[in-house]
Amino acid sequence: MAHSEEVSAATEANHHHHRTVQIYIDRIEKTSPDPTTGVALYALGSVSDTYVLFREVQGRRDDELVPRTDAPIHLTEWEHFYSAQAKLNPGSAPE
């Protein structure tokens, strides 16, 4: 097989395993590889260390916390994520 054919075959194989999808993080449209990782999603959304990221879930279930790890995360086109303070204490008096 010629070198250019090998590169084309390898590139095509990668397209089957890694695609890009459009997602929203804090209502801002982003492009992400799929699959990705929690670490990559936090970086893509510029989520600070004092915040956590959630994946919106349809229906009456709780939204899912996205762990800040290298574990693979499979995405769906136009999926929504949002950040929130890691330590929320509603109703507490401001310091």
Image (cartoon, rainbow, N blue to C red):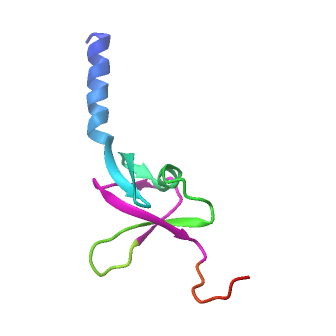
Number of numbered labels in the structure image: 0
> Could you say where residue 49 lies in the image, as x and y percent from the top left?
62, 61
Q: Residue at x 39, y 73 (%)?
A: 63
Q: Quadrant of the N terminus?
A: top left
Q: Is residue 73 magenta?
A: yes
Residue sitting nearer the eye, 30 or 64 = 30
Q: Quadrant of the C terminus?
A: bottom right
Q: Is residue 65 left or right of residue 77?
A: right
Q: Residue at x 53, y 66 (%)?
A: 52
Magenta span of residues: 64-87
Q: Residue at x 44, y 61 (%)?
A: 26
Residue at the farthest front position: 94
> Could you say where residue 68 lies in the image, as x and y percent from the top left?
53, 59
> Could you say where residue 2 lies in the image, as x and y percent from the top left?
28, 10
Q: Is residue 49 magenta?
A: no
Residue at the farthest right position: 95
- Asked where in the image residue 58 lies, by quadrant, the reply is bottom left
- Asked where in the image residue 74 lies, by quadrant, the reply is bottom left
> Vertically, is 36 above or below 27?
above
Q: Is residue 74 left or right of residue 70?
A: left
> Vertically, is 75 above or below 64?
above
